[in-house]
Image (tube, helix red, strand yellow):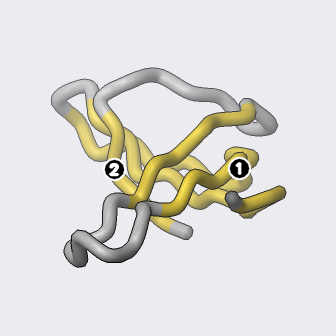
C-alpha cells in the first residue's frame, strides 16, 4: 500500500490505516501496517510504502 502523510515516520514504524467505504452497506477496512519505504516529498510530507500486517 502506498500513501502520502504529513508526519515524520521511520522505517519499521507500525501504523493503523482506515480505508472508508463509499457504500453505506459496507464498513470500511482497518489495516495494521509497517513502513517499508519512505520518500521525502518536501513541505513536511512523505510518500510511504506500507506492508499490510493484518486487516479487519
**Residue 51 or 30: which is nearer the viewer?**
30
Q: Position of residue 56 (x, y in %)?
A: 68, 58
- Element class at badge 1: strand
Q: Position of residue 13 (x, y in %)?
A: 73, 31
Along the horizontal axis of the image, is 22 left or right of 33? left
Which of the 4 quarters of the picture holds residue 46? top left
At label 2, counting other C-alpha atoms closer than 10 Å, the crowd grade (few under 14, some 14-19, many 20 or more) is some
Which of the 4 quarters of the picture holds residue 28? bottom left
Residue 4 image label: 2
Q: Position of residue 14 (x, y in %)?
A: 73, 34
Which residue is pictured at 41% across the width and 52% down the height? 47
Tell which residue pokes out farthest to the front in this image. Answer: 25
Along the horizontal axis of the image, is 24 left or right of 26? left
Along the horizontal axis of the image, is 2 left or right of 13? left
- Element class at badge 2: strand
Which residue is pictured at 17% across the width and 29% down the height? 43
Which residue is pictured at 41% across the width and 59% down the height? 19
Residue 33 image label: 1
At label 1, counting other C-alpha atoms closer than 10 Å, the crowd grade (few under 14, some 14-19, many 20 or more) is many
Image height of 30 relative to 10, above or below: below
**Residue 14 or 46: which is nearer the viewer?**
14
Image height of 52 relative to 7, above or below: below
- Mark closer to the chain start, 1 or 2: 2
Which residue is pictured at 32% across the width and 75% down the height? 25
Which of the 4 quarters of the picture holds residue 45? top left
Quarter holding the N terminus is: bottom right
Amino acid at each position: 500500500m502506498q500513501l502520502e502523510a504529513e508526519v515524520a515516520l521511520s522505517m519499521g514504524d507500525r501504523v493503523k490505516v482506515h480505508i472508508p467505504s463509499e457504500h453505506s452497506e459496507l464498513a470500511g477496512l482497518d489495516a495494521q501496517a509497517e513502513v517499508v519505504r519512505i520518500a521525502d516529498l518536501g513541505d513536511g510530507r512523505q510518500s510511504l510504502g506500507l506492508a499490510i500486517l493484518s486487516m479487519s
